[in-house]
Amino acid sequence: MIKAVIFDMDGLMIDTEKLLVKYWLEAARYYGYSMNPNHIIGIRSMEPKHAASKLKAEIGQDFDYYKVRNLRKKLMGEHIEKYGLEEKRGLGELLDYLKSHHYLTAVATATDYERTCQYLTSLGRMEYFDEIVCASMVEHGKPEPDIYLEAAKRLKTEPFACMALEDSPNGILSAYRAGMYPVMVPDLSQPDEETAKLLYGCVENLSKVTALLEMQ
């Protein structure tokens, strides 16, 4: 029986993945690198050290991941400060359902703690979560299972009693390795063949997650 639901953030709760693509590409161009959207899609939720190696292999060994990433963060931060954030369809409905049915909830995100709190507070969603776990709080980020195992530990719940909601293959793999019920809510891409094998479910938006919970 599922007792807890653990959320990724970027691309799942908040419509930021399109901004990540836009500003990764803009930052890469600024430094003279040739980058395309598939490069960014492939590193979603991935721990920086793995993302850096992957992009060097795909773009070239001279690709300075951290320099480009820092500019991307600056540009994206300026955009969000000016225009604000958009939450994904069905988030409010799902959070209200979880609260009224007494599920435990947590966020498991690659985004740093300060920005996570800032984003969720700006949308009025911070109060819905019992715990927030960021990649900086564990030894290994996604796709390793550490962040989901830490979330379960903080919720005082076994991993097998947790549903994990993700929009990226790296996040799904992380949740699967942790022994949870991985559910994908696709954003920029549909699950590929390998990811599909790991899924407990795949739904078009967050409001559809309630049906999966009621099947338990």
Image: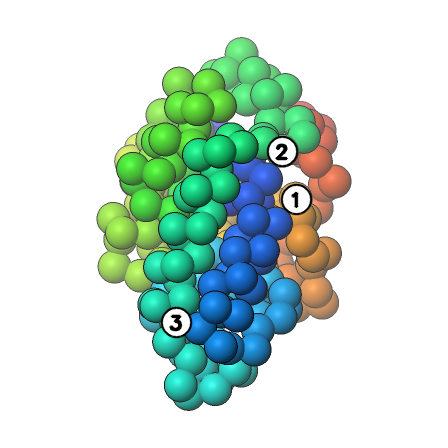
| Kind of residue at badge 3 | Tyr
Nearest the eye: 140 or 136: 136
Closer to the camera: disc 1 or disc 2?
Answer: 2
Q: Which residue is mark 3?
A: 65
Relative to residue 45, is residue 40 drawn left or right?
right
Q: Which residue appears at 56% of the width and 49% of the height? A: 19
Mark 3: give few (<14), some (14-19) or many (20+) Cα within 10 Å: some
Q: Which residue is mark 2?
A: 88
Q: Which residue appears at 49% of the width and 33% of the height? A: 82
Q: Which residue appears at 25% of the width and 48% of the height? A: 137
Q: CA distance from mark 3 to mark 1?
A: 28 Å
Q: Residue 181 location in percent, x, y?
A: 55, 45
Q: CA distance from mark 2 to mark 3?
A: 28 Å
Q: Which residue is mark 1?
A: 185
| Kind of residue at badge 2 | Lys
Contact flag, marks 1 and 2 (Cβ < 8 Å): yes
Mark 3 falls on what kind of element?
helix
Mark 2 falls on what kind of element?
loop
Relative to residue 138, is residue 4 drawn left or right?
right
